[in-house]
Image (cartoon, grey):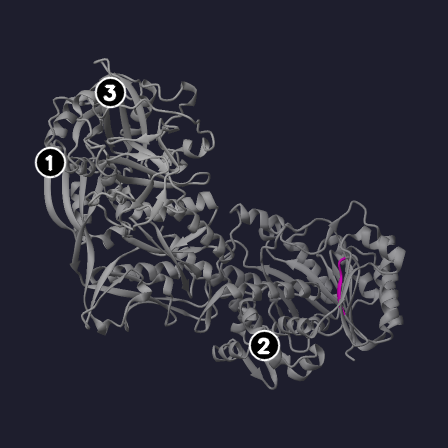
Amino acid sequence: MDPLALYIHWPFCLAKCPYCDFNSHVREQIPEQRSRGALLRELEWEAGRLGSRPLASIFFGGGTPSLMAPETVFRLIEAASAYFSPLPEIEITLEANPTSVERSKLAAFREAGVNRLSLGVQSLDDRALHFLGRLHSAAEARAALTAAREIFPRVSFDLIYARPGQDLSGWRAELAAALSFGPDHLSLYQLTIEPATPFAALSAQGKLALPPAETAALLYEATAEEAAKHGLLPYEISNYARPGAECRHNLAYWRYADYAGIGPGAHGRVTIGDSLLATRRRRAPEAWAARVERSGHGTDEEEALSPTERAREMLLMGLRLAEGIELERFRARAGLALSSAIDRQALTDLLAAGYLAWRGGKLAATEAGRLRLDALLPRLVR
Amino acid sequence: MLASAADNAGKIHYPFRMTETPIAQIRNFAIIAHIDHGKSTLADRLIQATGALPEREMTSQVLDSMDLERERGITIKAQTVRLSYRAADGLTYALNLMDTPGHVDFAYEVSRSLAACEGSLLVVDASQGVEAQTLANVYQAIEAGHEIIPVLNKIDLPAAEPEKVRRQIEEVIGLDASGTIEISAKTGQNIEAVLEALVTRLPPPEGDATRPLAALLVDSWYDPYLGVVILLRIKDGRLRHGQRIRMMSTGAVHTIERIGVFTPKMQPTDDLAPGEIGFVTAAIKTVADCRIGDTITDDRHPARSPLPGFKPSVPVVWCGLYPADADDFEKLRESLAKLRLNDASFHFEPETSAALGFGFRCGFLGLLHLEIVQERLRREFDLDLIATAPSVVYRLHLGNGSVKELHNPADWPDPATIEHIEEPWIKATILVPDDHLGAVLGLCNERRGEQVDLTYVGNRAMAVYRLPLNEVVFDFYDRLKSVSRGYASFDYQMDGYAPGELVRISILVNGEPVDALSFIAHRSAAEARGRAICARLKDLIPRQLFKVAIQAAIGGRIIARETLGALAKDVTAKCYGGDITRKRKLLEKQKEGKKRMRQFGKVEIPQSAFLAALKMDA
């Protein structure tokens, strides 16, 4: 069995960013103790049914996990290490915002066991940061990056591009400045308008216009070029890494390996017996905690996925990766041969058009294919 | 249909006996007017002045009872009202007002309505003057042998120019305008003079009650309570209760159930005598059995020959009608059947299109008729419809000597079998202020028009043109309106067939024809229209993973081409563990949506793109 990836969700933020549709909540007082207790309890419950599996990664996501008390982080890592069998090279990532307050906690997180920091820099331009509703300045972002590189063995950060009015040369300059910090991993996201966010409302009123698809495509290509200059290669649609520095935890999602999700709104895909279960916890932090306190876990939905569903999920995740999908692994995981999961004619057309390619026994989307993956999937999937 | 026919069903008061009016005291008349010149207002005023309806039952435009008729100020069905008028000579006259359909599409129906009368009121707006539509109708009335009384309406308006309009009536129409009556239907000014003129200037009808029954079928409509109601004019003989009547064109026999006149309510009578206009019901199921212009006679003692002028109605313009939502197909079928209950002049048959799914090929008397039917389907039956480009009826002379009538581009035969093709022409009359004349003549020439006549009346020109009908069904009205800033008035009549260099243009997407978009046009217009459709489709088809070639072709020859480039980018930026279920469900929904797509080579194009392409035509 594949080693397990463990996701822990911390849902609290100081403010909601106008583009974000993640499960995040703003509270006057973060219920630290209650959340810690419930997380520990749900972890214990989940570990109880999963058994002592090898543990490849832990990921603290949010929300804003850098708002957690380092003590909470420590206790969770400690518990996970006890329930499961951590691999020697276990990757433990924590997402952090680069405000000065949070910067001061970085050493304590490292102390707690975190060995990879993912900084939500988003931009190195103050005006852009303001537009994106971020609470930090470009100067704080630089300071946090410098501090993180001193404290953590591995550091990644996020940037958001294809903002309204952003042009090619502006983005190249901003990206070059970011790359000068010498990261070995970057997540570079194109700004998209998600439903039920303040940006969606602005967009509906015609007050927010994203660059057209053609411009977005050019920005995307420029991004890969700039990253390549610093030895960072696109291993997933929005993720760039020096070979070997890929985020192992996120790779588990894209490779469709087992991952357990703890905390409000967390999703999981865990193999129990012959079933691959899709799990989802209650989204609202208080309701989730109450349920955990009552029953040991905050599960809202749990269903066993059919081979067809598994095949679709594995395709839609796997084709995001430059490495593609391994046929044998696909059959073993989905319970269905790849040839039965896809439309043969579409496959032929897409291969001929250069959107898909066979790479040493793996089916992969080319760069052109990854750029159009959402249009490609409905054709390919049977 | 009179509102009262439906509203008062079951409220007919028996027994009732009209006082028989001697034929010398009957006057049958029509009102001829351009839209908005006040025909309906005048009719209302006449009804009011003779006390036919109590004040509280007067709604504006009593006779135009369909919503659509009221809104557009046009009459679709013929209607009558019998007015009882005590004239200056002390006698009481029965004045039968026949309200006629006011549009060229219903020219034949108009001619039958006029054939039921001996005279007409020609109503002209004293500020607007004579319009093209007035002309066509007044000539029809003159042809029908009518005595015509010119009436200038809206005389109360400051812009009224009665002298000028009087001159127009003399110069343009050629009528003696000395007896013109100046009125305001709105204020009621001089209405009495109109009533007096009807009595003194129109001849009474002629007819012989002792001869076998001969009645002109003027119109018919379906009433949910009474079945089909027939509007007719007795020429000779008498019509009685229980009489067995025969339709002379079909030989069908029915027994009379109800007889009456409209006052404008349905008022039963015992019989109808020569010269009278009234209604009958005879347990007839559909109006298709009652052909306008037919002669109704007595089954046992039939007339020797039918009344002159009967013509079965033939559709002139055809188009495909498709439900925008494929699930509405059955509803569309039922709605069309219901409409046809009341409108036998419109035809429909099922048709299948690869691009649009299931629909109907429908035939109409003209463009307005097409519009009215579409509008009624939308309003009364709540259907969202897509119409393919309207087509006229072509005559294809084939090599084997046979002649094929064709109105559906899909039925176009192998061009090698076609010897030559004929297309229908019209004679159009256009009246336009001379500042816009140049633009109007330009439009007519661009549409292959041949000038027949051009005369001036004051600062207005009257151009008479022969035009191919297919050039007129393709956005001619809209263009005429825009080049004349709305000042041109237009009317036409069918004017035979003539050979033309016609071709079928196919629209191809990635080399495959889109049946619903093919059309027939003159060779000289083919390229421009083909290019326009290709350009429009390029805008409407969403970008695909692959390039899409959009072409217009005549046979194997490409005459226009557009290329829709491949989609530049379409991918979710962030996709992690929490997004998988949502993304999978979205994918499943997209797969479901593909059922509404049509495959063209490697690309799948949503039906909505073709629907939108056709909608823009409308």
**Residue annotated with mark 2:** A342
Q: Chain of mark 2?
A: A
Q: Would you say the residues marked 2 and 1 are in contact, meaning their CB atoms lie under 8 Å apart?
A: no
Do discs 3 and 1 belong to a common subunit? yes
Do discs 3 and 2 belong to a common subunit? no
User: Would you say residue A9 sits in the magenta stretch?
Assistant: no
Categorize mark 3 by other alpha carbons within 10 Å: few (<14), some (14-19), many (20+).
some
Q: Nearer the viewer, residue A26 or B572?
A: B572
Which residue range is magenta in the image? A265-269
**Residue annotated with mark 1:** B456
On the image, the x and y values in percent for residue B105 come to 27, 45
Secondary structure state at the residue bearing disc 1: strand
Q: Quadrant of residue B58?
A: top left
Q: Quadrant of residue B68?
A: top left
On the image, the x and y values in percent for residue B192 come to 25, 17
Categorize mark 2 by other alpha carbons within 10 Å: few (<14), some (14-19), many (20+).
some
Q: Residue at x 27, y 23 (%)?
A: B21
Residue farthest toward the front in the current orientation of the protein: B300
On screen, B191 above or below B248?
above
Q: Residue at x 49, y 78 (%)?
A: A349
Q: Would you say the residues marked 3 and 2 are in contact, meaning their CB atoms lie under 8 Å apart?
A: no
